[in-house]
Amino acid sequence: MNPVTQTSTYLNSLTFAGYSNNVEKTYLNFFFTYEPKAKVLFIPREMGETGETTVRIDEQDMSQYAHDKPQGNDARRLEFGDGYYKEIYAARIGSQLNISYEMRVAKRFEIGTAMKRFNASVPNRQELDRQHFAVTFVNVASYINMDGRTVDMTAGDGQAPAYATHPLAFSDVTWTNIVPANPQLSVTSLEAAQKLAVTDILDNYGLPVEMTFTHLIVNKQDPTTVRTAREILRSTTLITQANPGVINTFSQVYELVELPLAATDANGRQDSTKFKWWSIHALSGMNRSQMYECIWENAHMTPGFQDPYNDDYIWGSRGRYAFGRVSARGQIYSLAV
């Protein structure tokens, strides 16, 4: 039997031109399969690389109902007002891949391993920031990220996203988006969240408005919560009933999103105090959750080059984005333990 000749996948097998071609191809191919789990929670805004680095997003409200019009009288104008607003500031991130001369001449590092880590570095950080903004730090007004930068978590009303007494711009009424007693996920607790989705979804005049809650969010680190969510949403009969003839009214009401990075600290290390957190979000229609992801630079490569002083082959990856929450309306949380 003749031996099979195998092409080496080690970093010392290519010239700089070969390296660059390989790096660029694997970088582009990475995005064909990459799926950011939390992207669905945000309204995307493409700002363009030359766009202003600060963007302001305003909340606008109008009164919902017409009024009596006696004969000969003018119709009453609808009330209109700017509610809260949020200013969002761009932040740039980057990573660098250096392949030294010594790495190239000795079989120390496989190109596949190097490329995977480099390709994923910017998208992974962006997804970590998404999940931190959408879930992880919703109970605080700000947090310090892994690079020491303060990240503003407040909604336009100046409060933490998950808050018991959110104010309204044109009313003394307050509202909450925290499930009472922060229960673990169950049929009963999900019903309690659904009640808030009716009683505490208000416009800035204090009047109820309808939002369609479409997604149930759980943290992947807690198998019990994940299993409970799957049972509630996917069983053909109600899981609290032994009678198989009782229809499961939760079936197909929510889309389940299992987040792998939300139950972590600012550095991406697991945080067991948040394993059982869950939430529901209104992500469809005109009147939907107002979390924004503003993107100035999608993840991209910078041109590679060979450093003439130390002989390293160098490539860079960059991204520029930021998140903002005009209102926490449409986001209901249970910070269960």
Image (cartoon, grey):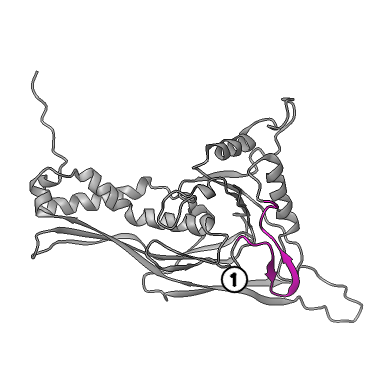
Q: Closer to the camera, 80 or 156?
A: 156
Is 92 rendered above or below residue 16? below
Q: Which residue appears at 29% of the width and 49% of the height?
A: 117
Horizontal arrangement in the rendering, residue 206 relative to residue 317 (left or right): right
Q: Is residue 175 magenta?
A: yes
Q: Which residue appears at 56% of the width and 37% of the height?
A: 224
Residue type, label 1: Gly
Q: Residues within 10 Å of mark 1 (few under 14, many from 20)?
A: many
Q: Is residue 278 magenta?
A: no
Please state the horizontal and vertical placement of residue 306, each as a whole percent of the image: 12, 61
User: Magenta residues: mostly which secondary structure?
Assistant: loop
Please state the horizontal and vertical placement of residue 302, each as a whole percent of the image: 25, 63
Horizontal arrangement in the rendering, residue 2 relative to residue 36 (left or right): left
Horizontal arrangement in the rendering, residue 46 relative to residue 278 (left or right): left
Q: Residue furthest bottom?
A: 73
Is 294 rendered above or below residue 115? below
Please state the horizontal and vertical placement of residue 292, each as a whole percent of the image: 52, 63
Provide the residue designation for mark 1.
156
Q: Which residue appears at 61% of the width and 62% of the height?
A: 328
Please state the horizontal and vertical placement of residue 283, each as a whole percent of the image: 59, 54
Is 110 rendered above or below residue 16? above
Q: Quadrant of the N terminus?
A: top left
State how many labels appear.
1
Q: Residue furthest top?
A: 1
Q: Closer to the camera, 115 or 310?
A: 310
Give residue 236's quadrant in the image.
top right
Q: Which residues are magenta?
A: 162-181
Q: Residue furthest right?
A: 71
SS at mark 1 in the image:
loop
